Amino acid sequence: MRSNDSYLRWIELERQRIPSYGHYPFNLGAIRNLDQLKLHPKVTYIVGENGMGKSTLMEAIAVAWGFNPEGGTKNFTFSTRATHSNLYEYIRLARGVKKPRDGFFFRAESYYNLASNIEDLGMHHSYGGKSLHEQSHGESYFAAFIHRFSGRGLYILDEPEAALSPIRQMAMLTRIHELVQQDSQFMISTHSPILMAYPDSILYYLTTEGIEVRIFEETDHYMVMKEFLNHKEKMLRELLE
């Protein structure tokens, strides 16, 4: 997919409308200093330490697009508990000329609620035909990526690596590539060095000061994991003594 074919080209914070930066979520550094965020036509990563606002930002973009705050497609209207922020009201989306045929908001923390709603609606045939609650958590997760995502879609994934083994994470990276080749666009928030390694992408790193572009090898996730694996004994001594 070329940049001018992106389903979602950029997001913009309507700063002039924000009443105060003293309260959540506008007091988060990444949100407070957000102006315009250009999205990659294939894969955009939103990464950083916990508490930096990754899930808050991903949720706001998803809701502004029309997805259910707890996940699913635009057709899902269930609500277990309304805990999402009002950031989506201040986010403007620059949509591309082409419209996606498919779309899905996947968030790890509310996947059980989503799976329950899928079961209640009798829609598990679209997720491999097997009850999502009769599979392991990881198998149920993976079924959505393999069976439900059909291409030519906008997919927003918040920490999709949860409950997935490293081998399954590599399989997910392969699936992401397959879907990108089928004119799909991804936004992914993750802590997994495996999942954030897709080469044709842009990586935004959230800090207390704002948002910056980094390369994969400059992320804490990569550097810490590499250091641990290459110098395990030394790291264990420092951690445990």
Image: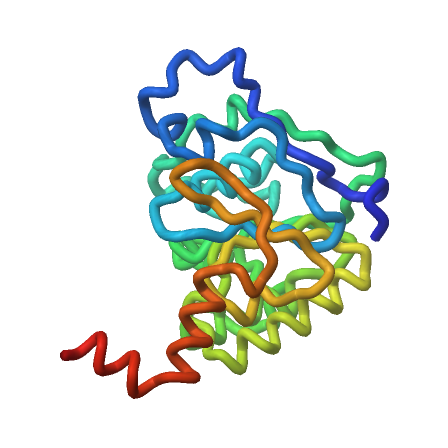
| Residue 42 image position (x, y, % from top left) | 73, 54
| Residue found farthest to the left | 241
Q: Is residue 193 above or below residue 60?
A: below
Instruction: Give the quarter of the figure containing the C terminus.
Output: bottom left
Q: How is the image coloured?
A: rainbow
Residue drawn at 71 percent across, 30 percent down:
94
Q: Is residue 9 above or below residue 103?
A: above
Q: Is residue 152 above or below residue 30?
A: below
Question: Is residue 119 visible in this depiction of the protein?
Answer: no
| Residue 148 image position (x, y, % from top left) | 64, 62
Q: Is residue 209 left or right of residue 169?
A: left
Which quarter of the figure has residue 198?
bottom right
Q: Nearer the viewer, residue 222 or 198?
A: 222
Residue drawn at 53 percent across, 22 percent down:
90
Q: Nearer the viewer, residue 36 or 129?
A: 36
| Residue 167 image position (x, y, % from top left) | 53, 82
Question: Is residue 199 visible in this depiction of the protein?
Answer: yes
| Residue 172 image position (x, y, % from top left) | 60, 71
Q: Nearer the viewer, residue 124 or 27?
A: 27
Residue drawn at 68 percent across, 35 percent down:
10
Counting the numbered discs, the total is: 0
Q: Is residue 131 left or right of residue 236?
A: right
Q: Is residue 52 left or right of residue 42?
A: left
Residue drawn at 61 percent across, 67 percent down:
197
